[in-house]
Image (cartoon, helix red, strand yellow):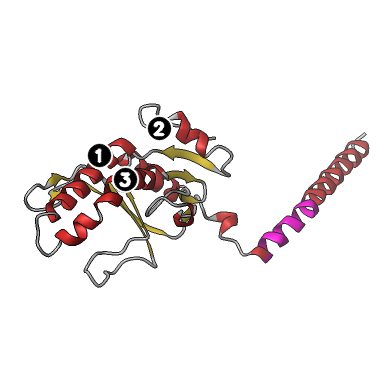
Amino acid sequence: MAYSDPGYESEDQIDYFEGTEGLVQVFEFDYDKTLAFRWDVANKSYLAMLPLPCCCCCAWSAMPCWCTCAKPNMEDAIRCQHVCVTQDGIRYVEDKHKTGCRLDCQDSGKVTKTVPFDKLTDCDIEEPAGASGPICCMVDNVLYKVNIDTASSGGSNEAGVVRHEMILVGLKDPHGFKSMVWAMKRSGAGFGAAAMPAPAQATMAGLQPLLTRQNELLEENNKLLRQIAANTSK
């Protein structure tokens, strides 16, 4: 059964994951705060290119698309995100949304990703610091990041950026999310039957009725022995 702190998760987010198997808790992104920050950075970066000789031609030619599609695309890309914690792991979903010139042929399809607790090696919070955007009009960073790692992640790409299995930006309750993830991992969630090979699961399922019947026969045998002992003592 899912539960939620009404100060952080809306009914819409809880309803979104309704019916999800093993649902433990839903966490919500701060869509408005994320959109305000990212659009402020993107818009100032675009405007800063307009007077530059090396960029002005491209920037001016892209203005119609920028004015009509850039912000709606960004908003769709932000609001399509959903995340929850299940008994098996962290489940992240990006719904189908518009991109590019917002034509149907440019739609980005739904993507679902799960990080199992038995594969999880790290879940840390990166607090906001510094600023982003053009040097002439930078914007203070205000969004928390939750970096999730597995044994297969880590290292750096060509730009020197550390690779993570999953990065969640703009959660309303990043500390609550981290606490829940570690609590589930410590409890052994995601292990057990999920980690048992399929043949072993089938064997255990087949033995269960036999063990139950064996216990019944032993109980009947004990009753007969007690009756014999009682009759002998008379």
Residue under numbered circle 2: 9
Residue labelled with disc 3 = 68
Disc 3 from disc 2: Cα separation: 31 Å
Report the mark closest to the observer, 3 or 1. 3
Q: Is residue 172 visible?
A: no
Q: Tell me the amino acid under the disc marked 2.
A: Glu
Asked if residue 68 lies left or right of residue 127, the reply is right
Identify the residue under disc 1.
36
Given the image, on which type of amino acid does mark 3 rest?
Thr
Q: Is residue 125 left or right of residue 224?
A: left
Q: Residue at x 28, y 69 (%)?
A: 155
Local packing at callout 2 (Cα closer than 10 Å; few below 14, some 14-19, many 20+) is some
Identity of the residue furthest to the left in this view: 136
Q: Nearer the viewer, residue 138 or 1?
A: 138
For the residue marked with disc 1, what is the amino acid?
Ala
The residue depicted at 15 percent of the width and 62 percent of the height is 55
| Image quadrant assignment for residue 193 | bottom right
52, above or below 184, in the image: below
Question: Callout 1: few (<14), some (14-19), or many (20+) C-alpha neighbours within 10 Å?
Answer: few
**Residue 98's x, y, as percent?**
42, 49
Mark 3 or mark 2, whichever is nearer to me? 3
Residue beneath the point at 26% across and 64% down: 162
Q: Is residue 118 visible?
A: yes
- The mark nearer the N terminus, 3 or 2, is 2
Magenta stretch bounds: 199-211
